[in-house]
Amino acid sequence: MIDEYTEAAIQRLLTEHGGLAEQGIKVIRRERVLVLCGEVESRQRRDEILRLVHENFPDVPLSVDIGVTRASAPTEAEELP
Amino acid sequence: MIRVAAVGDVHMDQDVVGRFRPALERLPEQADVLLLAGDLTRHGTESEARCVAAEFGGLGVPVVAVLGNHDHHCDQVPQVVKVLTDAGIAVLEGDSTVVDTPGGTLGIAGAKGFGGGFAGRCASEFGEPEMKAFVRTTSVTAEQLGAALRDLDCDTRVALTHYAPVPDTLAGEPPEIYPFLGSYLLGQAIDSAPTALAVHGHAHAGTERGTTPGGVRVRNVAHPVIKQAYSVFHLG
Ligand SMILES: [Fe+2]
Ligand SMILES: [Fe+2]
């Protein structure tokens, strides 16, 4: 059972924990799992989110859908006449 | 034509060093200047600033930045600014700089900005000292941004902020947090001068395109929004 207070606590942990500092992750309560979704700058950051949320909320079933933001050069420019 | 590259919210630390560099090596072929729209670091430490300097320094084009809220977290702003400045990155806060490009002079006025919300749904300078201080912070930074834009002597003006000047580019974020993502006062400052483009970051789940009430084009260049190392805009 995932309640609203847990949702709030996880959202704040993501931002306020010194090892995370992530404000851009959405915390979504679904029927059976808590979904963490968004983008981070490295795989280590995604792994650390998973590790710390699991460590602090061991009873919360998690589904982690966090990608690493692509960093390739743009192929097109936007024309702003 | 002036070619402007921009990205925000790169949130650098050791684990990110080198990720942008392959794309950045090609940047001078594509752009005359690079704008960094704040949240350059994760916590605003001097060591993270050194990662920013290593990644975005020595590019071969001028680099102009504003700080973001993350860059303030550890209360080391002077040290962060010094590391960036020593690496040749200009850091703006309520002031401006002019860059010479083959397409003419580009004036960039920049400020981090702050929250407060948007017309009809915004905080007011009223009540508790904490609330007044919150709104006052935004109005002071917006006034400085507006003055810096109006005072620029250049061919083309660009406004650079971390917080959003319009709600358009926040679409995708929960509406409940808009007051923490930007302020209409920044948009009003941008509209007080003939600004060609306004770029900002901060809203990682927002949208690329928007316009101020005065018709200035606004672009959210937060890295998770643009999903590439930087965006390039051709002005004029
Ligand atoms: Fe950010
Ligand atoms: Fe931010």
Image: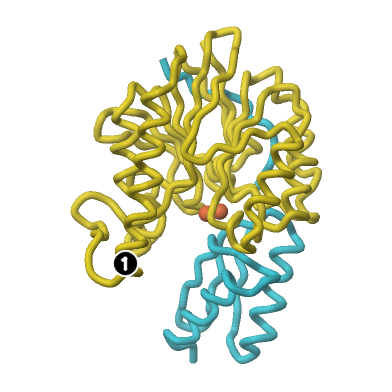
Towards the viewer: B91 or A70? B91
Towards the viewer: B104 or B18? B104
Tell me the subunit letter for badge 1: B
The cyan one among the chains is A
Q: What is the residue that sits farthest to the left in this orientation?
A: B120
Left or right, B126 with respect to A23, comes to: left
User: Does B116 sit above or below residue A11?
Assistant: above
Q: Residue at x 63, y 53 (%)?
A: B77
Q: Residue at x 54, y 79 (%)?
A: A10
Residue B18 on image: x %, y %: 81, 43
Residue B6 on image: x %, y %: 57, 33
Residue marked by disc 1: B131
Residue B68 on image: x %, y %: 55, 50
Instruction: Residue type at mark 1: give it.
Output: Met
Left or right, B155 with respect to A56, comes to: left
Shade representing chain B: yellow
The quadrant in which residue A38 appears is bottom right
